[in-house]
Amino acid sequence: MASISQQLKSCDESYLLSISNKGILNRARRELSESGISVEIAEERFSAVFSDGTTVLFSGKLSQYDCSCPSRSVCKHVVMALIKASEEVWTSENAAASGDVKASEDKKASEDNKAPADKRPIQDASGEGAWSFGKEAYGYILKETPEKLQKAFGKKTYSDALSIVQSGDPAVFEEGANLRIRVGEAFTATFLPYSDIKDSLCTCKAKTCRHRLEAILHYLSREGSWASLTPLEKEPEAPLDEIPGIMSFVEEIFMAGLMHLPSGFADACESYASVFHGAGFADLERLFQSSRKELMHFEQKSAMFDKGMLLSNLTRIYVSCNALLRGKTGNYGKFKRQYSELPKLEAFGLGAYPWHAKSGFAGVTALFAIPQMKRIFTLSHSLPASEEQEASTMIAGFWRDASALGVLSSFESLSTSRVEIKSAKASIDGRLSKSRATSASIISQSSIDSEELKPWILDNFTSLTKFFSAEQADYGESLHLIIRIKGFVEIGFNKITQIYSAKILDDDGSSLNLMIPYSKINENAIMYFEKLKDEIPEYMTARVDIPKEGRELSIFPIAAWTGGNIENVSKQQFSPHSVDYSKFFMPN
């Protein structure tokens, strides 16, 4: 931990603005000369006394202070004390530096720009004369791991921040009295030398925020520690160190009774909710949030207080914590999918396909390759549909829908277009949200000749495993790719299994199994390939499914690329006489 004197060296304008605001800072500067302030600086603390009797005491850290004025937040006295104390530290440092070099004025003149970092003058508002403690002062950031960051900020916050940083949106680094990292367009995180991430600050003023985490990830990436920063998809890990205290907290409520509880118990619920949020236990977080609300209603003598609800919450919390302490696992709920806002980006539509799930939902899902984020994202339209005929009718409407992303064009057209998207919201598992805040404009139709699509083109089937290991492993049950086609063989429909299949060949003669299970939803896709026969598309967007044990890897067709252009195979319409439908039904 840095001494108080070292911390005061990092107290520049950026730091003062981070803990207060421009109005308080300007007022403190105006009143400083008339305040009659005197400061006393020691190794681990310093104090300031004003002529009106107000006193400010700092202990251990600049963030740990106590002011005798009535203000509950950072006041002008705190800011004036910091300005006065930092000026005295620098006056002392500069005087010592001048004394060291009096013996050799010529040496001082020649080496002035090479003075030790801690002897340089504090930087002014323009950044002139900036100095730095050096990278070693921020070594504590480099010691952060995914596990530590998830514990400090929460799993969801970590995943969202990592997704945003991986999008390629750059950060701006400023190293001077402290380390400042600007993320996005409006937020700057400030890190103090020889300190801890708990003492970092952000211009958003929140005690714990995503912007600080984004800044940390950017710094780790810049310093070469990016490799270990990946989304952690492990099972939730019980916060065993915290659980005995949580159980004692519940016991105290039951034993003392609500009338005898000291103030602050509602705030304790908020703290414990944060513990379970970071650990990934959604239900326990919600129970504590609900308990906090009931305790606040009780303290405020509100008619909304529900004794039964509070009793139920606390009982469930206690039983669940006791089970976790004894090593028993269970289902403690999942968090609602969190969506993070992405920067303005360009996306390439790779086609769309219809589906009808066993859960009773039907929809159409479009695929978009976003080179800026090096991933394929999905955008879906879906509604409940119990019967296949109902699902088929509903899907026909989805293809024509013109409301997605605010584009006045059909969903089918959007799925095959190159678009610019603003204020997109995406989840860590690669799903785009249909947020009303998102807007998009079509640039042109997607073209296979686009240089940006090359990372997703598979032209050698034996190299398919590299795509699974690089992208699919962390994000789901299947992988989407563009497959270059040399030929089709063994085309046919099995009336017993009701599956249309073919083998797709690459230039080396390796093959992949194309499989389309027959259904009303997949009928057009089957007709598309049945009609093609010898008219082979050059490329095909496909979903590659992970094979279950004992089965071969297979692909499901989504869109075909011919002459550089793209069309959805499941949307094509055919004349009733163009294909013999009878072959697609089981014999009597």
Image (cartoon, rainbow, N blue to C red):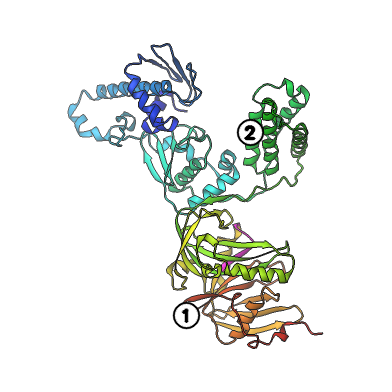
Q: Are marks 1 and 2 in contact (CB under 8 Å)?
A: no
Report the label total: 2
Label 2 Cα crowd, 10 Å radius (few <14 / some 14-19 / many 20+): some
Q: Amino acid at mark 1?
A: Gly
Residue 284 is situated, as x and y percent measured from the top left of the image, at 70, 40
Q: Nearer the viewer, residue 528 or 236?
A: 528
Would residue 358 be found to the left or right of residue 275 on screen?
Answer: right
Asked if residue 394 lies in the magenta stretch, the reply is: no
401 relative to 63, above or below = below
Q: Amino acid at mark 2?
A: Glu
Asked if residue 477 lies in the magenta stretch, the reply is: yes
Residue 315 is situated, as x and y percent measured from the top left of the image, at 78, 34
Residue under circle 1? 563
Would residue 222 be found to the left or right of residue 328 on screen?
Answer: left
Q: Which residues are magenta?
A: 474-481
Looking at the figure, which quarter contains the C terminus?
A: bottom right
Residue under circle 2? 270
Which corner quadrant of the image does residue 310 belong to?
top right
Residue 480 is situated, as x and y percent measured from the top left of the image, at 57, 67
Would residue 386 be found to the left or right of residue 457 on screen?
Answer: right
Q: Nearer the viewer, residue 526 or 215?
A: 526
The kind of secondary structure element at disc 2 is helix
Q: Nearer the viewer, residue 502 or 316?
A: 316
Residue drawn at point x = 40 percent, y = 11 percent: 52
- Residue 85 in view, yes or no: yes
The kind of secondary structure element at disc 1 is loop
